Image (cartoon, helix red, strand yellow):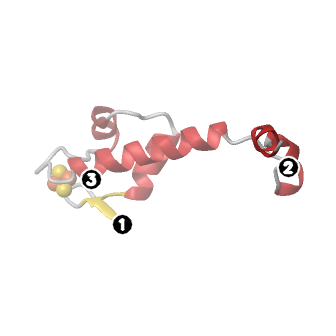
Amino acid sequence: MYVCVCNGVTDKDIQREVDAGCDTLSDLTMNTGLGANCGSCVTLAETLIEGMRMKAAKRDLDVPVLGGEVPMHFFAHDQHAAA
Ligand code: FES
């Protein structure tokens, strides 16, 4: 999807920039031209950048669990509550 029509910047372009470490709107503007003309794309771009950053942070915090399921003993709080 085009986010910045003036400069032909898509959400995929923004994702690529965020994945490469770009985390400010001014960096994004420097690298892609987004927002450098009419500026009507800036609010959407900021929202997308924040969402992409949060998604990346969540991905970094996820702990892989063998077998894809969390063993029940991980929920020690529930065991104490039932006792
Ligand atoms: S739509 Fe991005 S500068 Fe105009």
Vertically, is 46 above or below 3? above
**Of the residues shown, which amino acid type is indicated by label 3?**
Leu
Q: Earlier in the sequence, mark 3 or mark 2?
A: 3
Which element type, helix, strand or loop, lies under badge 3? helix
Q: CA distance from mark 2 to mark 1?
A: 42 Å
Answer with left or right where residue 57 lies relative to residue 22.
Answer: right
Are discs 2 and 1 less than 8 Å apart at CB? no
Label 1 sits on residue: 1
Answer with left or right where residue 31 lies relative to residue 41.
Answer: right
Which element type, helix, strand or loop, lies under badge 1? loop
Of badges 3 and 1, nearer the viewer stands 3
Quarter of the rendering containing residue 80? top right
Answer with left or right where residue 19 lies relative to residue 49.
Answer: right
Label 3 sits on residue: 44
Label 2 sits on residue: 72
Q: Earlier in the sequence, mark 3 or mark 1?
A: 1
**Of the residues shown, which amino acid type is indicated by label 2?**
Met
List x then y, in percent, for residue 28: 33, 39
At 17% from the left and 44% from the top, the residue drawn is 36
Q: CA distance from mark 3 to mark 1?
A: 12 Å
Are discs 3 and 1 less than 8 Å apart at CB? no
Residue ranking furthest to the bottom:
1
Between 63 and 75, the one nearer to me in the picture? 75
Q: Residues within 10 Å of mark 1 (few under 14, many from 20)?
A: few
Q: Residues within 10 Å of mark 2 (few under 14, many from 20)?
A: few
Q: CA distance from mark 3 to mark 2?
A: 41 Å
List x then y, in percent, for residue 33: 26, 45
List x then y, in percent, for residue 73: 87, 43
